[in-house]
Image (spheres, rainbow, N blue to C red):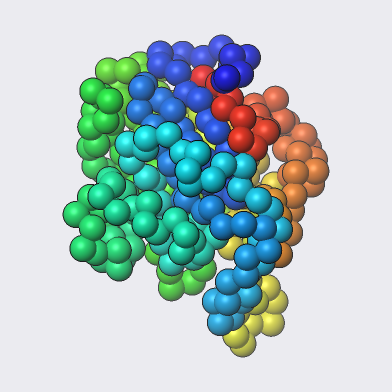
Amino acid sequence: MADDSAPRSGFQSSLTVTFVGTATALLEVAGATFLTDPYFSPAGTQWDLGFLQLTSAYEPALGLADLPPVDAVLLSHEDHPDNLDARSRPLLDGRRVLTTADGAARLAPRPGVRGLRPWEKASLAAAGVVFDVLATPCLHVPGGECVGFVLSAPARFGSTGGKPNAVYFSGDTVYLPELARLRDDYHISAALLNLGAATVQLPGAAEPLLVTMDGAQAARLIRDIDPDVVVPMHFEAWNHFRQGREPLAAAFEAAGVADRVRWLEPGKPTRIL
């Protein structure tokens, strides 16, 4: 059963989030169900990327067999197994998927997969609602594509201050100043942020490279886009993550944004809006 202790908001529909683990979550909004970055491999799974060996130390809170019918998948990038593992790839068959342009080409010939470039828009009909989807830029591992998503539906979500209410899923990225422009065009009712201060040691580099936001960067983005509610994701149980919940929470407290943050219990449907 969903937790109904949602904050007061001008959002005219409802948003329930079930956090599965890492960047994987179910978003139930306006009668439709979206799945972000599906990963369902068991604890202890290892992935050799050549320059980095990833090891997971958590069990996803839901299994593939536990998933409800999914209307669309929001896939920030398909080339990193902690965002799309081998076990989850068949889930994309015969399903609508929004992802990067290169990712869509690699996932072909699935006809339901559409690639979007940063700041490109698409429309998606689900559960009798037409959703507008904006792909947002990410800066992740050099040479790789990654996008976030802004989901809006003016007829169902309503507006605040003349701007359409929206739900933002950041994808894997470090802080980007250009994301501040989201506040010009949308009222971000909820922001799901991939954090964890993940680092990679690239060949020839003197220092590890930060590839997802740390707490200070996330706090800066929160101030930029001014969301009503923030849901932290992507911060637990991988060997390349450097910040878990406690240091992230401390950074949010220090920046004065902790009152917006909603930490979710994995596997528990939680009413966010």
The residue lying at 75 percent from left, 49 percent from top is 244
Classify 257 as above or below 39.
above
Query: Depth check: 61 or 26 in front?
Result: 61
At 71% from the left edge and 58% from the top edge, which residue is drawn?
57
Instruction: Say whether residue 239 is visible.
Output: yes
Q: Position of residue 81 (x, y in %)?
A: 51, 64
Q: Find the residue positioned furthest to the front.
A: 65
Q: Nearer the viewer, residue 65 or 214?
A: 65
Q: Is residue 39 left or right of residue 217?
A: left
Residue 220 horizontal/vertical position (percent): 62, 43
Position of 119 with respect to 218 (left or right) is left
Quadrant in which the N terminus appears: top right
Whether 5 is drawn above or below 231: the answer is above
Residue 227 visible in the picture: no
The residue depicted at 65 percent of the width and 33 percent of the height is: 264
Q: Position of residue 219 (x, y in %)?
A: 65, 41
Name the spot of residue 210 as percent of width and height, x first.
63, 64
Name, please, the residue furthest toward the bottom.
204
| Residue that appears at 35% across and 28% down | 32
User: Residue 56 vs residue 155: left or right?
Assistant: right
* Number of on-image labels: 0
